[in-house]
Image (spheres, rainbow, N blue to C red):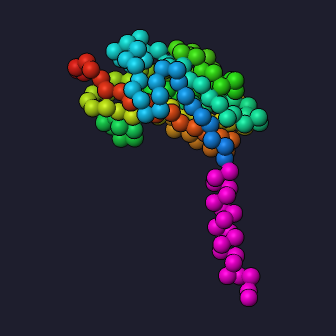
Amino acid sequence: MSLFPKLPIILITSIMTSFTSQTKLNVTSTSFTDNGNIPSKFTCEGTQASPALNITGIPSGAKSLALILHDPDAPMPGGFTHWVVWNIATDGNIPEDFKGAEQGFNGAKKSGYIGMCPPSGTHHYHFKVYALSAKLDMGIMVDKAKLDSAIKKHVLAQGELVGLYKNTKTVK
């Protein structure tokens, strides 16, 4: 029996193992559960403070965390980004109304967090957290696309928390 018929199976197994060997972060919040409703306090109906997040499963080699909060349901091409943050400490604690680390541009082209304010229906808000093998030197003009590009070769682990929100006010 030839070794060559087994080669594709070995190659496929090797490739699949490389994709699944990445550690998964566990991202939680004391304010809402995964796929649960986000309290209005964190939205345009409240103070627009960012919710507290807890991250566990951070690999020992991680030098920093990065976070992207994105609404893919927003009625614009590519959705709407609510928060872009990097060089977060690796202690796993992002407190409520977090102003630390490096804050990039949200979809309104302003630095920092902007609360949820969907024009209609219930939207899904993806809090994506990445454990990185380095701290990033990115300057100040950073948006979701630039951060996505910069972290690609540094991601050791990632995790996600999804929150739901439906605006009860009339949006003008």
The structure residue drawn at horizontal position 52% and vertical position 20%, both measured from the top left corner, is 30
Front-most of residues 72 and 107: 72
**Which quadrant of the figure has residue 80?**
top left
Q: Is residue 1 above or below residue 81?
A: below
The structure residue drawn at horizontal position 69% and vertical position 30%, both measured from the top left corner, is 64
On screen, residue 146 versus residue 169, left or right, reads right
Is residue 76 at least partly visible in the picture? yes
Q: Position of residue 132 (x, y in %)?
A: 68, 36
Q: Position of residue 98 (x, y in %)?
A: 56, 16
Front-most of residues 113 and 125: 125
The structure residue drawn at horizontal position 27% and vertical position 32%, both measured from the top left corner, is 121
The structure residue drawn at horizontal position 31% and vertical position 32%, both measured from the top left corner, is 122
Magenta extent = 1-21
Is residue 151 at least partly visible in the picture? no
Q: Is residue 11 above or below residue 72?
A: below
Q: Residue most toward the top?
A: 47
On screen, residue 46 versus residue 28, left or right, reads left
Prevailing SS of the magenta stretch: helix
Residue 105 among those drawn in magenta: no
**Which quadrant of the figure has residue 172?**
top left
Q: Position of residue 101 (x, y in %)?
A: 63, 20
Q: Position of residue 11 (x, y in %)?
A: 68, 69
**Which quadrant of the figure has residue 155?**
top right
Front-most of residues 32 and 13: 32
Q: Is residue 11 above or below residue 140?
A: below
Residue 8 among those drawn in magenta: yes
Front-most of residues 58 and 75: 58
Quarter of the picture containing the N terminus is bottom right
Number of numbered tags placed on the structure image: 0
On screen, residue 51 versus residue 168, left or right, reads right
Q: Residue most toward the bottom?
A: 1
